Image (cartoon, rainbow, N blue to C red):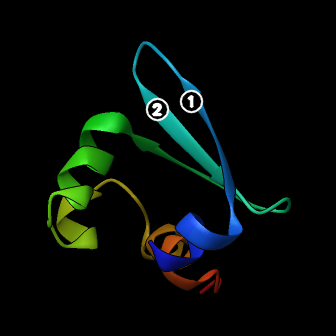
Amino acid sequence: MLYADNFCTYTETYNPHTYHFTDGTRTVSVLGTQLYKYRKGALLQVAFPDLSPSDREFLLNGDKL
């Protein structure tokens, strides 16, 4: 999540616990449990199976497929 960590801001909502990463033009939301799994070493596609390839690409480098 190089792009999301360095170039996006995020907000949190609860019930369910969700993080919303935005760069001002696009927002991608991920569940807190999935983000935790990714931070513990899971591959992006394993940690976020419900995200589209385009959303995963955005989190990595901001590119839109």
**Residue 53 x/y as whole percent:** 42, 75
Q: Which mark is residue 12?
A: 1
Count up the numbered dots.
2
Above or below, 10 against 2 in this view is: above
Q: Give the amino acid type for the residue marked by disc 1 in the picture.
A: Glu
Residue 52 lies in quadrant:
bottom left
Q: Quadrant of residue 47?
A: bottom left
Provide residue 31's location: percent of width, then percent of height: 37, 38
Question: Dots 2 and 1: beta carbons under 8 Å?
Answer: yes
In the figure, 27 relative to 65: above or below?
A: above
- Where residue 59 appears, as percent x and y from the top left, is 52, 70
**In the foreground, 17 or 45:** 17
Mark 1 crowdedness (10 Å alpha carbons): few <14, some 14-19, many ≥20: some
Q: Which residue is drawn at 58% across and 76% down?
A: 3
Where 33 sits versus 14, above or below? below
Q: Quadrant of the N terminus?
A: bottom left
Disc 2 marks a residue whose amino acid type is Thr
Q: Residue at x 59, y 87 (%)?
A: 65
Q: How crowded is the residue under tag 2: few (<14 C-alpha within 10 Å), some, or many (20+)?
A: some
Q: Residue furthest right?
A: 24
Which residue is located at x 49 percent, y 78 percent? 2
The residue beneath circle 2 is 18
Residue 25: mark: none
Per the image, label 1 sits on a secondary structure element best described as strand
Distance of label 2 from label 1 (alpha carbons): 6 Å
Quick one: which residue is furthest to the front in this view? Answer: 6
**Residue 61 appears left or right of 38:** right
First-in-chain label (2 vs 1): 1
SS of the residue under disc 2: strand
In front: 5, or 46?
5
Q: Where is residue 23 in the image (x, y as percent from the top left)?
A: 76, 63
Left or right, 35 with respect to 63, comes to left
